[in-house]
Image: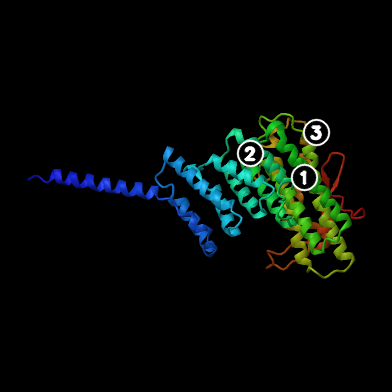
Amino acid sequence: MPLRPYIFGIILLLGLVADGVRVAYAQTLTNFATWKAPENAEAVPDWARIMLNREFRNLEGPERETRLAQVLAALQDIVGDADVVPSTRYNAVLAVGQLDSRVGNPPTAYPPALAYLADVYQNADSPAYLKYGALLGIVRHAVCGIEPDPQERIIALLLETAAGQTAESNAEPLKPDVGHWFQCTALDGLTALKTMGPDGKVVSELLALMEQKIQEIELLSEHYDLFVSANAERLHRAVELASKAAKVLGDLDYRSAAGIDSDRMADVFVKLTQAVCVAGCRMITVYLDEERTVPEPNVLKERIVAMQKMSMQSVVWGIRGGFLLPNRPAEHSFYASLPEGDSALVRLDALLTDILAISAFFDEGESSRRSAMPTDASKAFRFDLLELREVLAGAIVHESGALSHPGSVASL
């Protein structure tokens, strides 16, 4: 008897069995009830990862949408149960942010999950840890891409958070460093969206945030002891937030922008650079005048230079949409959008020239006043505190709005 029919029959049977296994496997929903048990809290992060890989394997179209709705409902039940261990609720809301309608690069995030995350975040009764988990999911949706309909709500949410307005919870007040995490994460979401929002709202709100932080830096520099830990941390947060906002501005596309106040933008970039330079200069002045010994001089130099570089590099990125050298300004950048001869362009050119000079000093020192360094000290700063103060003290604003370097510290 010919074997061919039997072979075909065996192949067909194996295929049917395999399909049956896949169908049965796909139809087996994770037992989410076990997630709620307190003794399983440590296992939940791994279970969530396994669930996200297993539940939707080989599922597309309506079947995937059905399974997504089931999983979202189960996760919502965990997140909303106040009797569940907080870490489990946090991991459940993180899993919500990882749900995808389609795989790809980037994947298509599940739209109903975004609406739920926004609701959790904006619910005043949500504890801070749930709000932050929801915010991380919202940022992931921004990275993957958000449809126009919910985008305006998400932009407003991120802008309010960046300004420090919506992260508070009725359950608990936020500590300053925690609020700072919320603000920086919201700026990550705005970077991912790369949109100016309705009527350029993103630009105007980020400039307002930077102006607020510049005032805070100036206040701290003038009236507070920056060697006190709490004041130093507050200064670092203000500089970091203003710098991050500047970088977000550099990620936006200005090619079709209308109604952007270019003079205001240039002014904010100049004032941020100046304020941070003045803060560094005052720290050195207090350190030397009061003959302080803590921290060590090299440690102080490192802190000040790191602060300067963070702000200056972000300002350059905000202006040019990229680093200063060796690249040309990005086509989408604020700098490239300005017409030749624009007053803001003149000021920005002068600012960039001065930033380049200060950056060269950080790397090489001032050739005419370079401290004597051993030949094997390639990683050491090539300047002392006095030389560093002299350069930073030159951060004053002329009528052009640029920085100059007169070398005088009398006014500081």
Taking 231 as reference, is 258 left or right? left
Taking 284 as reference, is 191 left or right? left
Cα distance in 3D space between marks 1 and 2: 18 Å
For image coordinates 81% across by 62% down, the residue present is: 385
Query: In the rendered structure, which disc, 3 or 1, sits on the residue that comes first in sequence?
Result: 1
Q: Which residue is mark 1?
A: 210
Residue 2 x %, y %? 9, 44
Amino acid carrying mark 3 in the image: Ser
Query: In the rendered structure, which disc, 2 or 3, sits on the residue that comes first in sequence?
Result: 2
Residue 280 x %, y %? 81, 57
Q: Are marks 2 and 3 in contact (CB under 8 Å)?
A: no
Residue 365 visible, this orientation: no
Crowding near the residue tagged with mark 1, few <14, some 14–19, many ≥20 C-alpha atoms within 10 Å: many
Which residue is at the far left?
A: 1
Q: Which residue is mark 2?
A: 194
Q: Residue 343 shows which numbered tag?
A: 3
Image mark count = 3
Residue 332 x %, y %? 65, 35
Report helix, strand or loop for mark 2: loop
Amino acid carrying mark 2 in the image: Lys
Viewer-nearest residue: 225 or 276: 225
Q: Are marks 3 and 1 in contact (CB under 8 Å)?
A: no
For image coordinates 84% across by 55% down, the residue present is: 220
Q: Answer with the quarter of the image where residue 246 lies.
A: top right
Q: Quadrant of the N terminus?
A: top left
Cα distance in 3D space between marks 2 and 3: 26 Å
Cα distance in 3D space between marks 3 and 1: 21 Å
Crowding near the residue tagged with mark 3, few <14, some 14–19, many ≥20 C-alpha atoms within 10 Å: some
Report helix, strand or loop for mark 1: helix
